[in-house]
Image (cartoon, rainbow, N blue to C red):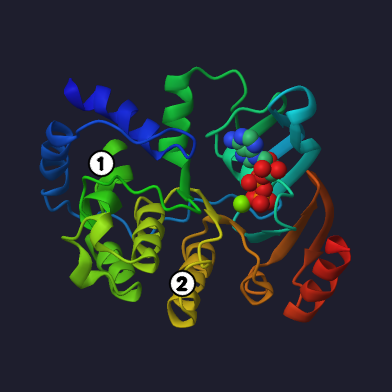
Amino acid sequence: MILLHLQDEVQTLLRPDVPRHGALIAWKQSLHQLSEPDHERTDAYPMTAAPAVLSAVQAEALNKTYGTGDAAVHPLKDLSVSFPAAKFTAVMGPSGSGKSTLMHVLAGLDVPDSGSVVVGGTQLTGLSDNQLTKVRRENIGFVFQAYNLVPSMTARENILLPSALGGQAVDRDFLAAVLERLGLTDRLGHRPFELSGGQQQRVAVARALVARPSVIFADEPTGNLDQTTGAEVLRLLRAAVDEFGQTVIMVTHDVNAAAQADRTVLLADGRVVDTLDQPSAADLAAVMVEVAA
Ligand SMILES: Nc1ncnc2c1ncn2[C@@H]1O[C@H](COP(=O)(O)OP(=O)(O)O)[C@@H](O)[C@H]1O
Ligand SMILES: [Mg+2]
């Protein structure tokens, strides 16, 4: 079935390291068919999370190197970290400390040279591409630093993409609430090039939320937003944890954004150097000065 081939193509399009290509017209028709039926809601918002003591994401001894010889960089150095389920964790650290690389590796979008990643009880290492795609589709939402929207698709189609790929019915009330809170209701027919950076980021946030994955990774989701919209995005991520039991892992440079999280993991030079529980913005500002020194 054409949809199956296109699923892989779209997954590839959503990878941060792969240039965008290809026409998706046939796939878009399938998307319309998938998203049109008005599915009955049979349950209230289900709690997907296990008790908070369990890890939603666990990484052991990750190493990642780019390039070789003198040009080699080593953004992950024997890095071990775990992220408790149904908690909101911020990841902070100086520019170049490996935050984006870590997020891509944890989400199965990039492969470590060594070490292991377990997401929702499934070890990603050693999975075939198809198996990895399935785990990603069923468990993981990702908000990229560079949005990574599909250029030929409207905002609405981009937002419905993960649900369509996973064959899931979209909860229309939830979708409407997310769109309203992100101020996207009147932008749904626009393509990415017709949207500002902030609007594209909001579409990317909505895309990560509506399929209700158990884990949402967000790489500087508020970096390009004005203060009001940034605050709304943080509230939505907070609500994903508090109301829906999802796990959120968010890279940010903003100590006020990180202070909304339950805990902050601090990276420096490819390693975890500190983990802070419920830090204030002032606590975080102080440790950020230390790691930058
Ligand atoms: N695809 C890549 N090819 C080569 N070097 C890369 C690539 N991605 C990241 N790097 C390098 O790895 C280091 C860590 O990058 P990154 O994880 O993006 O850091 P951060 O998100 O903390 O700013 C940087 O030195 C960066 O230049
Ligand atoms: Mg980064």
Cβ at disc 2 under 8 Å from ligand 2: no
Residue drawn at the location 64% of the way across and 68% of the way down? 261
Q: Position of residue 74 (x, y in %)?
A: 76, 34
Residue 204 x/y as whole percent: 38, 56
For the question of whether residue 178 can be seen, the reply is yes
Q: Quadrant of residue 271?
A: top right
| Viewer-nearest residue: 262 or 14 | 14
Question: Which residue is painted at 48% across and 69% down in the image?
Answer: 239
Q: Is mark 1 within 8 Å of ligand 2?
A: no
Q: CA distance from mark 2 to mark 1?
A: 27 Å
- Left or right of residue 88, residue 198 in this image: left
User: Residue 85's spot in the image, x, y percent?
Assistant: 62, 52
Of marks 2 and 1, the one in the foreground: 2
* Label located before the other in sequence (2 or 1): 1
Disc 2 crowd, CA 10 A, few/some/many (<14, 14-19, 20+): many
Residue 73 to residue 266: above or below = above
Dot 1 falls on a residue whose secondary structure is helix
Q: Quadrant of the C terminus?
A: bottom right
Judging depth in this view, the residue of 187 and 159 nearest the camera is 187
Q: Which residue is mark 1?
A: 164
User: Which residue is depicted at the point 50% across and 78% down?
Assistant: 231
Q: Residue at x 22, y 50 (%)?
A: 157
- In terms of image quadrants, where is residue 64? top right
Judge whether 223 appears above or below 226 on screen.
above
In this figure, which residue is indicated by the disc labeled 2?
A: 225
Under mark 2, the amino acid is Leu
The amino acid pointed to by label 1 is: Ala
Whether residues under marks 2 and 1 lie with C-beta atoms below 8 angstroms apart, the answer is no
Task: Pick whichever, 241 or 154, lies toward us.
Answer: 154
